[in-house]
Amino acid sequence: MKLWDLATGAEKFSLRVGRGGEDATFSVAFSPDSRLVAAGSGHGAVRIWDTETMLLRASLKGHTDAVCALAFSRDGKTVRPGKSA
């Protein structure tokens, strides 16, 4: 997954997506206001970045399997990870 600045065309951020190992990204979700992007990894972690600064805001662990689905709450204050059946 890549995130570009549409005004300049510059790449702001890049994540490995797919089956390329435990750190590969399996799911992505943007908060309702688009200020945060969450990525679920193959090793059960969810990482959350600020889309303006591209700084890592949180690294959350708790799943034992890949995080294959993500959803933010309507207010953007919580994120719900899930896995495939």
Image (cartoon, rainbow, N blue to C red):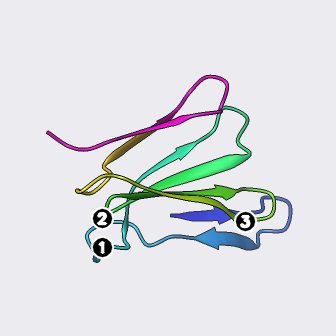
Which residue type carries mark 2?
Answer: Gly
Q: Mark 2 touching mark 3, by CB under 8 A?
A: no
Task: Provide the residue designation for mark 2.
Answer: 42
Q: Tell me which corner region of the image, top left, top right, bottom left or bottom right, holds residue 14.
A: bottom right
Q: Residue furthest front?
A: 62
Disc nearer the start of the sequence (2/3): 2
Mark 1 element type: loop
The tag on residue 54 is 3
- Count of numbered circles in the view: 3
Q: Is residue 38 left or right of residue 43?
A: right
**Magenta part of the chain:** 71-85
Which residue type carries mark 3?
Answer: Met
Q: Residues within 10 Å of mark 2 (few under 14, many from 20)?
A: many
In the picture, which quadrant includes the C terminus? top left
Residue 51, horizontal then vertical, whole percent:
73, 56
Residue at (70% x, 72% y) in the render: 11
Residue 54, horizontal then vertical, whole percent:
72, 65
Disc nearer the start of the sequence (2/1): 1
Q: Is residue 83 magenta?
A: yes
Which residue type carries mark 1?
Answer: Glu
